[in-house]
Image: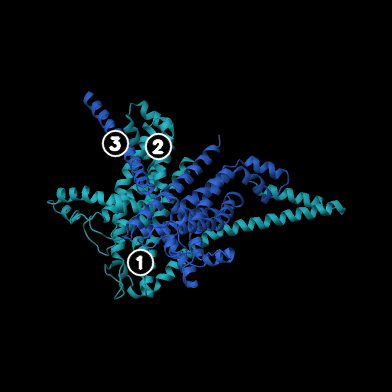
Amino acid sequence: MQPVRRQSVVDVALQGGAIETGAAMTRARALGRLRLGDAIFHSLTRIAAISVLLILGGVIVSLVSGSIPALRAFGLDFLFTERWNPVTEKFGALAPIYGTLVTSFIAMLIAVPVGLLISVFLTELCPKWLRRPIGIAIELLAGIPSIIYGIWGLFVFAPFLQETLQPFLITVFGNIPILDDVFAGPPYGIGMLTAGLILAIMVLPFVTSISRDVFDAVPPVLKEAAYGLGCTTWEVVRYVVLPYTRVGVIGGVMLGLGRALGETMAVTFVIGNAHKVSASLLAPGTTISATIANEFTEAVGDLYTSSLIALGLILFVITFIVLAAARYMLLRIERRIG
Amino acid sequence: MNALYARRRRRNGIMMTMSLAATLFGLGWLVLILGVLLWQGFSGLSLAVFTEMTPPPGADGGLLNPIVGSLILTVLAVLIGTPIGMLAGTYMAEYGRHSRLSSVVRFINDILLSAPSIVVGIFIYEVMVFPMGHFSGLAGAVALAVIVIPVVVRTTEDMLMLVPNQLREAASALGLPRAVVISKVCYRAAKAGMITGVLLAIARISGETAPLLFTALNNQFWALDGKAPVSSFFESLNAPMASLPVVIFQFALSPYKDWQKLAWTGALIITFTVLALSIAARALSASRKPS
């Protein structure tokens, strides 16, 4: 990487060409053209790089300007009111925010331990020749488009839950205080629990592939030292690998969380689209992205559209914070390893 | 002492069994989803799916217009997004490797990479659909391009970073200007990786639904007529355009059985296209793995 040296080569050549002979003149002109080409290419790449920033800037500006009418009409109350009434044009974002947080929480609750255990399996237990195929298979889960999860969730997974898991949860927790509220109500099949479970499956590959990568980056000397002391595999993972990779694992988890928060289509199919904050996980609810996906094209009136854009702004702010934190943590561990 | 040892071994055994179980659990979902997809979608697969337009409820038909629509949107998005992404990646890896701009762009790009795609839909709605006054295929393509760019930026930068510096130094020592070094030497060395990036980007956008919902919308028909294919092609870009994911969304949520069946078939087509693309991308990057 020595642009300086390249520059000087061209300079020397140019000066050499300054002798006034015909051949030297064409040589100077050719070099000049090359130089111009380089300058053009350089600024093109620079403009492209800046345009990436402009895209993000554009997203922020368009979200903010679009949501101003709604924020002006409802103020901060927008965040804390449950009502969502297109007829009277009274909107509040509490139900979608609640649904987004609850479904993402369920997803992480399942995906994090399972994902970590899979990476333990892949890095410590699995025979070498099987590692790559299993790793790829798990990553293929991430490649399946979210609309496929949605249609599968609606037609296969939700009916299945309606007949098995949900009645089971209702009868088991039916007589325990607090928990009977969390698992109350008729088993609809669709609802926040179903959405959370599908999100868990979707987030699983992200958590797995990042934690596998950071587990792989643990210096073998550390692990060998622990094994040399007589540690079991689990003890090595628990007391050597996990502490060493903690920041990276948290980064991976936050990256997965960012996905779960913003996931749209899969959730839209199975959440039930009810603007209600209910304690029961089995009840239908809604999320920010599902609300936007369902109502945006049908929204009539500026205030309605603007409220939906304001929802988008809230979603963007939440995911931006989560993703920025994730990147920061991953950067930190990268620096330590590199 | 022995009791402690037994307890440690038992705990190890439990945790390792659980990690095996977790892996089977994860793989199980893949098998389950693909299995259901094959079972539900395969029976609907026929020639008519590829040759007939989407039907009104209760009639026979296929998925011709959404398939063509998806192809057009994807090609346009790649045409718009790839050059910008590659140039930006080039800047970050070549001209400004250690500059402040590069590290800021890298950070922002990583955030765009996993930003919710529905937000991209709103963004394009605000800047294109609303000012133009109607939904259009072009807006859909631009929305998808916004998703393509970060993927291509990331892979281009990563792949150019892998090109050994000796190659650049050797070329520079011949007196070549930087632009020629990059285009004739670096790009060539990183070609497989950069193609992988484009393939991954295509895989990513071919299933995207959320950003298309309020940009390209949907269309039962198309504006193409046989007489003036070129001009009608541009007209159709300016009109709402059907795409596979949006049609699947609409058909799957409809109460009509034959629409739902078509949705499953469409889902099968999309999934296997995406999986084939990502496997191809992997094979390509594996064959080029630096030793």
Q: Are marks 2 and 3 in contact (CB under 8 Å)?
A: no
Q: Amino acid at mark 2?
A: Ile
Q: Residues within 10 Å of mark 2 (few under 14, many from 20)?
A: some
Q: Nearer the viewer, residue A140 or B179?
A: A140
SS class of the residue under badge 1? helix
Of all residues, the one furthest to the left in this rendering is: A175
Three-letter residue code for mark 3: Met
Q: Residue furthest right?
A: A21
Tell me what residue is drawn at x 50 percent, y 60 percent.
B141
From the top left corner, tell me how far across and down residue B132 is, in percent: 50, 72
Foreground pick, B115 / B264:
B264
Residue A259 can be seen in this image: no
Q: How many marks?
A: 3
Q: Amino acid at mark 1?
A: Glu
Instruction: For marks 3 and 1, give the one nearer the viewer.
Output: 1
User: Residue A295, which numbered label?
Assistant: 1
Q: Under tag 3, what secondary structure?
A: helix
Is label 1 on the same chain as label 2? yes
- What is the number of the mark on residue A134? 2
Q: Chain of mark 2?
A: A
Which chain is rendered cyan in the image? A
> In this rendering, which labeled residue sits more in front, label 2 or label 3?
2
In this view, B238 is above or below A49: below
Would you say residue A10 is visible in this rendering? yes
Q: The disc numbered 1 marks a residue on which chain? A: A
In this image, A101 relative to B173: left or right?
A: left
The residue furthest top is B2
Q: Which chain appears blue?
A: B
Q: Which residue is mark 3?
A: B18
User: Residue A241: image x %, image y %?
Assistant: 37, 37
